[in-house]
Image: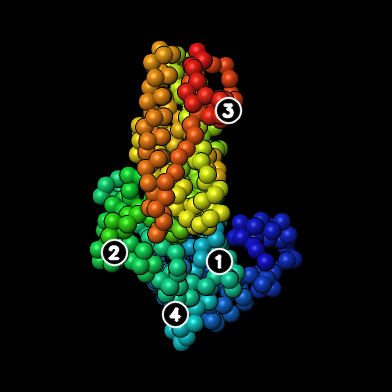
Amino acid sequence: MKISAINLKTAMLQIADDSFDPLALLDALPVGVVVHGPDTRILHANAKALSVLRLTAAQALGKDSLDFRWRVVDANHQLLPLEQFPVNRVLATGLPVEGQLLGVVDSQNDAVTWLTANAVAERGPQGRIERVVVTFTENRYARADLPFKDIVDSAQDVVIVTEAAPLQEPGPRIVYVNRAFTELTGYAPEDVMGKSPRFLQSTHTDPAVRARLSEALHAGKPCREVIYNHAKSGRGYWLDIRIVPLLDVRGQVAYFAAIQHDITAEKERADELAHLAFHDALTGLPNRRMLLDRLSQVLHLSRRSGSHLAVVFIDLNRFKHLNDTHGHQVGDLMLVEVAHRLRQRVRGADTVARLGGDEFVVLLPELGPDAEAATQAAARVADELQQALVQPYSLGELRYHASASLGIRVVRGADTSAEHVLNDADAAMYQDKFPRSTP
């Protein structure tokens, strides 16, 4: 049952008449009600309040905040300052208090009774506060008596708590880290206390992510991002980080808690899957999908610049015979070595790709605007590739000699598709080793 001090006061005013005793109603309520005078002395405490506070009426009436025979603690199990008592907060500010979590411990028993308290002022004709009505309900779900520090220390996720101010250097200063932090970063708590968590950040973190984090912190709002940090050893790691503001009893942001989940393995796996989507698993070369994408980009640039490009299609001769005679493991060694030799003979801007099986393609962009010069340049590269491929291969214990068939397609700004250019180079391999350029 949730009854605030404001709602209680309104209800009593609505039903009170000359024959009605409002105190009888208060005693019948399942909600604790304490009425204070402007000097904080208790004017009335109903039966539920006396039961929860473990007091008799004689012990409670007439007592002020300093006379209490029980201790009041905050959500962190720390003794609550007198100025933070609900009645004193209302008297100091004139504003109502809603939803303040309190723990009550009497002098005879260390057990904590957790309460959710509300308080509101009643004013006289001159606007002065004449009474403060405090209502409270037992909060059976508040477990501030649990060993939260032990729980957080044992958590697998990293937890960092910083002061809320200052946010600029040298802040926000670290005031707590759990064991998972030390295990992940290699830094002991004494190494980082008083420092800003920024010293862990890597330059690989997206500046836009940093800007969003800063904006959320300055606004005192929760946020969630993926960042890249460095451990004490220099090893990098990825974090899914959630930052939440921690409020004090006045509702002000006092600290920020960063809960960080190490997603390095997941990130690396995702990167690996993304790599496999565009690369050949055996040789590490771009696959057909990436080749067509790059060829499309080069064709687009060629149409704008007028520069020629060339596609060299390569097919290994008698590769099936090698596989059938010596097995696929030897065939795989051959393909890996071919990929290595092709990469060694091209420019950094060129692309070497494996289409599948024993088929490879070399993309040569930016060969210049002159058709004849571009064709000659492509032919020179093809000759170098051919010479590299006919050199003997050491495939385990097997010394093997191979050859390859090559076809070239040279284009400049043609209104054609990447697939069409690739097919033309494939066809050229069977028709003419060095076909003429098509402007």
Relative to 315, is 420 on the left or the right? right
Relative to 27, is 183 on the left or the right? left
Whether tag 3 and tag 2 are in contact, CB under 8 A, the answer is no
Per the rendering, the mark at residue 312 is: none
In the rendered image, the vertical position of residue 431 relative to residue 168, given as above or below: above
In the rendered image, the vertical position of residue 325 relative to residue 311, given as above or below: below
* Colour convention: rainbow
Q: CA distance from mark 2 to mark 1?
A: 39 Å
Q: Amino acid at mark 3?
A: Ala
Q: CA distance from mark 1 to mark 3?
A: 82 Å
The residue wearing badge 1 is: 116
Q: Nearer the viewer, mark 3 or mark 2?
A: 3
Q: Nearer the viewer, residue 313 or 173?
A: 313
The residue wearing badge 3 is: 427
Q: CA distance from mark 3 to mark 2?
A: 62 Å
The residue wearing badge 2 is: 187
Q: Nearer the viewer, mark 4 or mark 3?
A: 3
